[in-house]
Image (cartoon, rainbow, N blue to C red):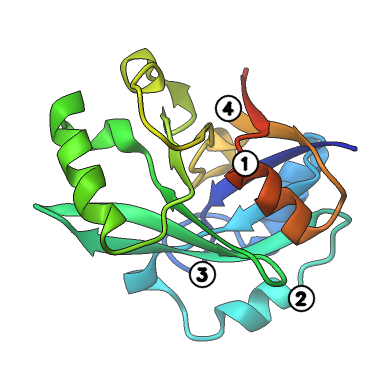
């Protein structure tokens, strides 16, 4: 089954401007099949899991967290939970003002800390051809990293998988998704 999704969204559970329900409504209205809430670890509201659990939608909702990790400065890694699978994504690699060489050094350090599965090659949903063409051993995914309604729907992934959390995460880990942009 062809599925459309976003693995990096924010809500009022941290620094987003929309409630989780408003985020879900906006993505669902654009034809998405799944989204991952990846609100920031240091801003996360204590009841975030309950709040996500109350969302009314036909989409698959992944619960994640955007971790702030210190590797020669800070970087972000999303940890997204399936039913049994867990996906770790090095987020928005082009936003750190690193050269490709500096990024590769940080990637090597990060690999010692987390079992990375993918890298996000977009910056707020916009393509970065330098980092998109970088030769790395991880699947590259597009996301819009939305914090507002304006940011929703700039970039997403599509994949052919069963409509279940672990099937989606396994397809991403295997590099069986493709990036799409408006």
Side of 178 where 93 appears, left or right: left
Image height check: is 92 above or below 85? Answer: above
Mark sitting on residue 38 = none
Residue at image position (62%, 41%) is: 174
Q: Do the residues labelled 3 and 4 touch (CB within 8 Å)?
A: no
Q: Disc 2 vs disc 3: Cβ atoms closer than 8 Å? A: no
- Tell me residue 154's x, y (percent): 58, 27
Residue tagged by mark 3?
13
Whether pointer 1 and pointer 4 mark residues with C-beta atoms closer than 8 Å, the reply is no
The correct choice, above or below, for 42 with respect to 162 in the image is below
Q: Distance between the residues labelled 1 and 2?
A: 31 Å
Instruction: Looking at the image, tell me whether mark 1 or mark 4 is earlier in sequence order.
Output: 4
Answer with left or right where residue 9 lies relative to residue 45. Answer: right
Q: Which mark is first along the chain, 2 or 1?
A: 2
Mark 1: few, some, or many residues within 10 Å (few <14, many ≥20)? few
Which labelled disc corresponds to residue 174? 1
**Is residue 164 left or right of 170 when viewed as pictured?**
right
> What residue is disc 4 on?
154
Res 112 quadrant in image: bottom left
Depth order, front residue of 169/153: 169
Quote the CA–CA distance across marks 1 and 4.
Answer: 24 Å
Q: Mark 2 points at which residue?
A: 54
Residue at the spot 60% in from the left edge and 35% down from the top edge: 175
Q: What element carries label 1?
A: loop
Is residue 63 depicted above or below 101 in this figure? below
């Amino acid at each position: 089954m062809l599925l459309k999704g976003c693995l990096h969204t924010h809500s009022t559970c941290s620094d987003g401007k929309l409630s989780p329900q408003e985020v879900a409504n906006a993505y669902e209205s654009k034809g998405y099949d799944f989204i991952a809430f990846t609100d920031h670890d240091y801003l996360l509201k204590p009841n975030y899991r309950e709040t996500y659990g109350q969302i009314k939608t036909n989409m698959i909702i992944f619960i994640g967290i955007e971790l702030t990790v210190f590797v020669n400065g800070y970087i972000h890694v999303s940890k997204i939970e399936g039913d049994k699978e867990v996906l770790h994504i090095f987020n928005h690699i082009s936003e750190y003002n690193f050269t490709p060489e500096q990024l590769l050094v940080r990637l090597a350090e990060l690999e010692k800390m987390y079992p990375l599965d993918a890298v996000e090659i977009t910056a707020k949903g916009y393509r970065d051809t330098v980092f998109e063409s970088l030769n790395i051993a991880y699947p590259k995914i597009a996301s819009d990293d939305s914090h507002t309604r304006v940011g929703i729907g700039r970039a997403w992934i599509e994949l052919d998988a069963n409509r279940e959390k672990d099937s989606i995460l396994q397809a991403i880990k295997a590099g069986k998704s493709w990036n799409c942009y408006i």
